[in-house]
């Protein structure tokens, strides 16, 4: 059994593939149980975001777990495999530390990934797939991420995806304050993006969501109005900027819907920012005249501009991580010795009990107590030293010198002539 991590991210796979292996929150528990129940996997946790899908597991057969990922999403293994990174043991530990610290994100230093790690741990606990090894790994991961953020400037001047969306809008429109914005969805990303946009005081804002109550909550906070997704067709045309990030498995905005809205707008341009994975907006929309369509990958490129302050802290962050990886691997190596140590102690305990029982029987017969204790100590000494002396007596010439040195070290014997 070994610690193993594998997955795809924004550097190894295009958005078109990443959206095919997303695990939605409502299905995550079932997916984890499916992996552990049907495959030789002892523990498992899954990180699934717009930029990455990663599986951390404790398994004897990593290839089976990787095959499961393709099988679960109804993909051919040969289609997914070229994009997978495979990280055994120490590489898995280092990767977890780097990801949680924001060093492997599309936006260097972004803080959201740490919360997503914590969500993954809670879900694995709920599914019953988080054991000693992964729990220890993730608790150490949180500690390392905290140290990196508090001891370096990795999070300084962070340009988030939300602020990148505003920057993009300001490149296209002379003033965001003169535009109307529609936010589709009610999750954390929409809330963050709305915060950045409303700081520019757009003409008016609308929140659309499948559940009207959640849309109303955001509308009250940002002084906008709330609608349901069923009202999108009639409301798109009155907005200039559309930001969408829902958990829908299928696009909710199609080419036909946008074409109708463009006609109603007399072809005044749309800015559409699709932050969802899988995508909320059909890719064909991007080919329409008067439409500026940007995906999460497009915003990542904008967010990466001007990273000098944070990049100067990377070397310091990597040094912290390297030290912590060494400490964790030492714990992991020591854990591997536990069965041997337990067997050694169990063997010694059995010998001790047998000799004590013999001594008690002799005392019950009335034998001299001093002689019984002498025999007990002699017998225990004999038994405990039998294995090493037997090994030393029967060692061949090649092994004897090494065995002598090891026994001197184990029993702390001083060298004598």
Image (cartoon, rainbow, N blue to C red):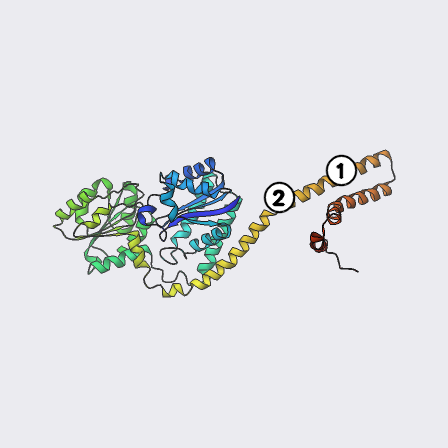
**Front position in the image: 149 or 316:** 316
Mark yes or no: residue 255 visible: yes
Residue sitting at 32 percent across and 58 percent down? 303
> Is 269 displayed left or right of 37 in the figure?
left
Residue sitting at 57 percent across and 53 percent down? 330
How many residues crowd mark 2 within 10 Å: few (<14), some (14–19), many (20+)?
few
| Position of residue 313 measured from the top left corner of the image (x, y, whole percent) | 42, 64
* Label total for image: 2
For label 1, the residue is: 354
Report how far apart the C-alphas of labels 2 and 1 lie in the structure: 23 Å
| Residue at the left extreme, as displayed | 266
Identify the image quadrant of the C terminus. Answer: bottom right
| Residue at the front extreme, as displayed | 397
> Is 168 displayed left or right of 146 in the figure?
left
Foreground disc of the pair 2, 1: 2
Residue sitting at 57 percent across and 50 percent down? 333
**Front position in the image: 131 or 53:** 53
Residue sitting at 19 percent across and 57 percent down? 178
Mark yes or no: residue 48 visible: no
**Front position in the image: 223 or 110:** 110
Per the rendering, the mark at residue 226 is none
Q: What element carries label 2?
A: helix
| Position of residue 379 measured from the top left corner of the image (x, y, whole percent) | 80, 43
Q: Earlier in the sequence, mark 2 or mark 1?
A: 2
| Position of residue 82 measured from the top left corner of the image (x, y, whole percent) | 38, 48
How many residues crowd mark 1 within 10 Å: few (<14), some (14–19), many (20+)?
few
| Position of residue 127 measured from the top left corner of the image (x, y, whole percent) | 45, 39
For label 2, the residue is: 339
């Amino acid at each position: 059994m070994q610690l193993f991590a594998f997955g795809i991210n924004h550097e190894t796979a295009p958005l078109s593939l990443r959206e095919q292996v997303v695990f939605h929150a409502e299905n995550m528990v079932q997916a984890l149980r499916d992996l552990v129940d049907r495959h030789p996997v002892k523990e498992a946790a899954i990180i699934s975001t717009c930029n990455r899908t990663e599986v951390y597991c404790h398994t004897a057969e990593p290839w089976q777990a990787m095959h499961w990922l393709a099988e679960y999403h109804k993909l051919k293994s040969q289609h997914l495999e070229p994009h997978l990174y495979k990280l055994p043991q120490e590489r898995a530990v280092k990767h977890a530390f780097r990801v949680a610290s924001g060093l492997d994100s599309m936006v260097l230093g972004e803080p959201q990934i740490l919360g997503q790690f914590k969500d993954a741990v809670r879900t694995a606990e709920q599914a019953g797939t988080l054991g000693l090894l992964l729990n220890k790994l993730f608790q150490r991961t949180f500690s390392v991420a905290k140290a990196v953020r508090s001891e370096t400037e990795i999070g300084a001047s962070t340009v988030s995806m939300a602020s990148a969306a505003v920057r993009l809008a300001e490149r296209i429109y002379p003033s965001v304050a003169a535009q109307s914005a529609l936010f589709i969805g009610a999750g954390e990303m929409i809330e963050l993006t709305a915060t950045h946009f409303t700081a520019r005081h757009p003409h008016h804002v609308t929140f659309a969501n499948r559940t009207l109550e959640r849309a109303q909550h955001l509308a009250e906070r940002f002084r906008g109005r709330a609608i349901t997704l069923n009202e999108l067709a009639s409301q798109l045309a009155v907005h200039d900027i559309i930001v969408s990030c829902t958990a829908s498995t299928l696009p909710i905005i199609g080419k036909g819907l946008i074409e109708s809205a463009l006609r109603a707008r007399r072809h005044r341009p749309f800015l559409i920012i699709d932050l969802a994975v899988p995508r909320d907006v059909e890719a064909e929309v991007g080919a329409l005249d008067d439409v500026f369509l940007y995906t999460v990958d497009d915003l990542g490129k904008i967010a990466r501009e001007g990273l000098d302050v944070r990049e100067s802290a990377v070397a310091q962050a990597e040094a912290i991580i390297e030290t912590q990886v060494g400490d964790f691997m030492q714990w992991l190596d020591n854990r591997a010795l536990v069965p041997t140590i337990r067997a050694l102690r169990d063997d010694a305990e059995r010998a001790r009990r047998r000799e004590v029982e013999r001594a008690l029987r002799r005392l019950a017969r009335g034998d001299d107590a001093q002689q019984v204790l002498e025999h007990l100590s002699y017998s225990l000494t004999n038994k405990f030293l039998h294995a090493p002396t037997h090994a030393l007596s029967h060692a061949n010439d090649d092994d004897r010198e090494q065995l002598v040195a090891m026994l001197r070290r184990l029993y702390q014997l001083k060298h004598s002539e």
